[in-house]
Amino acid sequence: MKEAKKIERVALKIGYLGTNYHGFQIQPRMKLPTIEGELFEALKKLDIIEDRKAANYSAAGRTDKGVHALSQVVSFDTSHPNLTPRMINSMLPDDIWVFALAKTHSGFNARKDAISREYRYFLFLSDEISDLNVALTRMREASELFIGAHDFSNFSQLHGCDRKTESYSTIREIKRVEINMEKRSSFIIIDIEASGFLRKMVRKIVSALRMVGSGMKDKRWIGDLLQLRMKEQIEPAPAFGLLLKNVSYRGIKFLEDEYARRRILERLKKNLHFYATIARMLGDMM
């Protein structure tokens, strides 16, 4: 009689550059490349999981097309012994990587157990704002209005299925918004932390703050949108500037794979050299 394999609940920290993918979540009907699709393909090839449902798979977030992540989290059950991030990375493309692993309690759910999510947006403003210090002050003052629990209907894009679900709520609580300007550059860095976000919520908040910073709108306009005194469709800021920076949990300890970390840094340096050269060339062409 064969001995039953030991089932363990594990969580992985994943980073990726979302440029070449149609979002994180797998899209079986459209058959488009996604982060999750590449991840499942790697896990299946390595006999780590066979089926998402059977493995009780969950993910902390569903980033949109073109959005990047430094620390996305997924969890699942597996009987694979000696599982390591470097093992999974051997089957992943260079723009997706696993760098840390945690063995969790059997009921852990990467989405439901997350206590906070942090996003960072890199906002480039040099061509549209003459005085970045004035813009920074306006944006900081306006950002204070977002702190706390609000109905973010005006700052989200809901799916049809969301609107039909009675229990679905557009109320979210933002814990922190920090806005800083990089020295000797035209980038404003916006950090936003909350327990959860609606679809395109961060990018719409960034777009609203940009309009206030440029003088197109004032902070009373943001107050009206949050109080639902008016309805307005805000164009979300471009996806390429958004990074899922971190997802936090209570009592879960992730162990980084140092070898995987070194290899990931090598990949990122190559990307940095490439894009820095392209940016410099475009500046010269302009």
Image: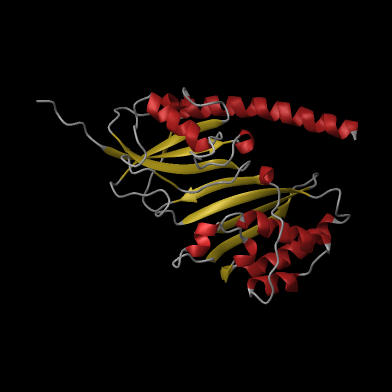
Q: Nearer the viewer, residue 147 or 163?
A: 163
Visible residue check, residue 86: yes
Q: Residue furthest top?
A: 90
Q: Viewed as shown, does residue 134 lie left or right of 170? A: right
242 lies above or below 256: below
Residue 66, image x, y percentages: 63, 41
Residue at 66% x, 25% y: name it: 270
Q: Dividing the image into 4 quarters, which one contains the N terminus?
A: top left
Quadrant position of residue 202 = bottom right
Q: Viewed as shown, does residue 62 lie left or right of 20? A: left
Residue at 27% x, 32% y: name it: 79
Quadrant position of residue 236 = bottom right
Residue 5, image x, y percentages: 21, 31
39 lies above or below 148: above
Visible residue check, residue 196: no
Judging from the image, the colouring scheme is secondary structure
274 lies above or below 149: above
Q: Nearer the viewer, residue 280 or 63?
A: 63
Residue 262, image x, y percentages: 53, 26
Q: Nearer the viewer, residue 126 or 216?
A: 216
Residue at 47% x, 26% y: name it: 89
In this rendering, the count of numbered labels is 0
Q: Viewed as shown, does residue 185 lie left or right of 117? A: right
Q: Residue furthest left?
A: 1
Residue 252, image x, y percentages: 37, 47
Q: Viewed as shown, does residue 261 lie left or right of 204? A: left
Q: Dividing the image into 4 quarters, which one contains the C terminus?
A: top right
140 lies above or below 246: below
